[in-house]
Every structure is written in structure tokens, then in C-alpha cells.
Amino acid sequence: MPGIDESLLEAMRLPGARGASLVDWISGLALGAAGEAPGGDPEAAAAETAELARHAAESGSLAPAEGATTGREPPVADLIVTTADSYHLLRFVSTPFDSTVFLHLWLDRHDGNLALARIRLAELADRLVLG
């Protein structure tokens, strides 16, 4: 079971990966990072993506149907944001405590494979060991 650093390095091996981080969406702090950061500032990128993740996680309109989760799972599985030249994939991570972290993968739009990245990031999130 890989830890944070191993998981981020594995994410960076995906085609088109430019950067990867594990972020707490409550505090906006990066718990780990690899590669580049969007905008060149890893702290700002973590805080800004955390705000987006927090809005999605706390949105009543995106909440799962009654009884569809165990209570330990994040309310949203993932978010995909596309720009002219890149994809940003945010994958929420289930944890035994409060599930307030997500993996952020920044992919080059021309070299990356969004479908593959989504599958692999979900696998990484399932295997990730925090603590």
C-alpha cells in the first residue's frame, strides 16, 4: 500500500502528467506534491483547488442519494476541469477518519489521456495509505 510520495510519483508516470498533489480541502494545504504546479505556485494551486473541491463536496445539489454512501466516503467521487491546454482531475480520497483530502492531477491536454488518468487516479486513491 503506497504512501503519499509513492502515490504522487506513480501519478506522475501517467502520460501527459505535469503535476500531482494531495490536498486537504478544509485547510487548503498540500500534504504532498510532485512535478509542476499550475501557475507556478504550489501553495496557491493547493488553496485554489481546495476551494473548488470544498464547494463541490458541500454542495447540496451534488449530494448522493439518501443511503447511497457509508458516511465515511466523500460526497463527490471526482471533478474534471478542462482548460484550453490542460485537464485538472480532482479525485476525492476515502479515509477511515473524515475524508477531507483529494488527489489533484494536472494533465497536458494534448499528451494526456483523461479516461486512463481517471481510472488510474481512482486506483491510487483506493490504495493510498495516509498516516
Image (spheres, grey):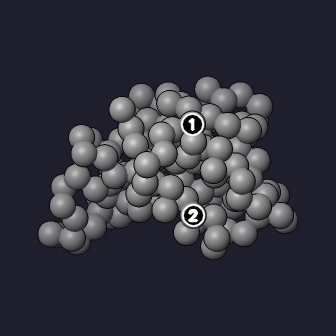
As drawn, the residue found furthest toward the front would be 1
Q: Is residue 61 toward the left or the right of residue 38 in the image?
A: left
* Residue at (57% x, 36% y) in the render: 5
Q: Nearer the viewer, residue 17 or 80?
A: 17
Q: Which mark is residue 120?
A: 2
Q: Nearer the viewer, residue 128 or 105?
A: 128
**Local crowd size for mark 1, using a 10 Å CA cut-off: few (<14), some (14–19), many (≥20):** some
Relative to 106, say whether 44 is above or below: above
* Residue at (42% x, 28% y) in the render: 27
| C-beta proximity under 8 Å, tags 2 and 1 | no
Where residue 33 sits in the image (x, y, percent)? 62, 34
Residue that mark 1 sits on? 5
* Residue at (23% x, 52% y) in the render: 72
Quadrant of the rendered image containing residue 39: top right
Q: Is residue 85 toward the left or the right of residue 101 in the image?
A: right
Q: Is residue 36 toward the left or the right of residue 78 in the image?
A: right
Q: Nearer the viewer, residue 47 or 129?
A: 129
* Residue 49 visible: no
- CA gap between label 2 and label 1 equals 16 Å
Where residue 37 sits in the image (x, y, percent)? 71, 36
Q: Is residue 48 toward the left or the right of residue 3 in the image?
A: right
